[in-house]
Image (tube, rainbow, N blue to C red):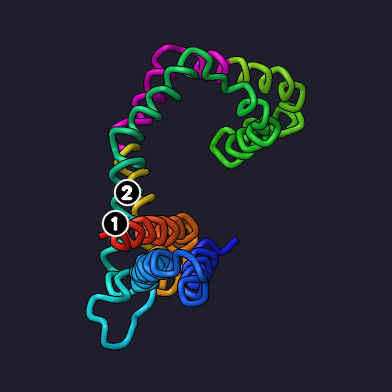
Amino acid sequence: MNKSLITNLVAILLVFAGFFSPMYSQTLLSIGLFALSGAITNWLAIHMLFEKVPFLYGSGVIPNQFEDFKSGIKNIIMLQFFTTDNIKRFIQSEEESVKKDLDFTPVLDAVDYDNIFQKLIDAITTSPLGAMLNMMGGAEALEPLRQPVSEKMRIALQEMAQSERFQAAIHQSLSTDKLGADISEHIEQIVDARLNELTPDMVKNIIQHMIKKHLGWLVVWGGVFGGLIGLIASYI
């Protein structure tokens, strides 16, 4: 429903009624003219926000102030939502929720212990101990040790990952201050990149989509109050 169009049509009908009605013609004409003037001036004001009108200084406010609107959008995003303090608080809350349950089991399960053992054998065979190992049957002599050594390595890594010192080192490396600043900087770069893609028409359409349908009520109330003023004026 186009509120502006309906309001203007009603006002025009009242004007015609004022010309042709045998009763209260002067009152109807006054109400219609004042309502039409109020509705049209408000409609023109809304139109001038989004479009440039020839010979009307100040029209096309949104396209003309394109850079200011971009800056305002960025400030809203960065200063109200993605501030460094807000990001720090989020990181701290996430750290507290996982601090006591930091589990490296999936990481340890993904380690290829056979490959590590093979690298160990390769290192031995290419070292001065290689000749001695060849006298004892070569690398095949160490093969029975593959399973127990792999299990011992996994246990050792598990104990290390669960140690207080290791956990403290992990949390210390995840510095809240540094992460907060880095994340804030990255977000700002993303916002800048996206805003640089915007054109004046895109900004106009975004704002127009958000508020224009609600601004239609300005035309309605302009017509209503204009009509009331016309009614009062007809009795003065």
Q: Secondary structure at mark 2?
A: helix
Crowd around label 2: few <14 · some 14–19 · many ≥20 (10 Å): few
| View extreme (bottom): residue | 54
Is residue 211 among the parts visible in the rendering?
no
Figure quadrant of residue 6:
bottom right
* Residue drawn where x is 56% and y is 64% of the image: 2
**Marks 2 and 1 in Cβ contact (< 8 Å):** yes
Identify which residue, 136 or 58, lies in the foreground.
Answer: 58
* Residue drawn where x is 46% and y is 54% of the image: 214
Taking 4 as reference, is 182 above or below it?
A: above
Crowd around label 1: few <14 · some 14–19 · many ≥20 (10 Å): few
| View extreme (front): residue | 22
Amino acid type indicated by mark 1: Gly
* Residue drawn where x is 37% and y is 24% of the image: 92
Taking 26 as reference, is 227 above or below it?
A: above
Taking 35 as reference, is 116 above or below it?
A: above
Amino acid type indicated by mark 2: Ile
Identify which residue, 147 or 14, lies in the foreground.
Answer: 14
Which residues fall within the magenta stretch? 156-178
- Residue 231 is left or right of residue 23, and the answer is left
What residue would you read off at disc 2?
A: 76
Figure quadrant of residue 192:
bottom left
- Residue 52 is left or right of residue 146, and the answer is left
Residue 126: which numbered mark, if any? none
What residue would you read off at disc 1?
A: 72
Give the x, y percent position of residue 130: 61, 36
Q: Secondary structure at mark 1?
A: helix
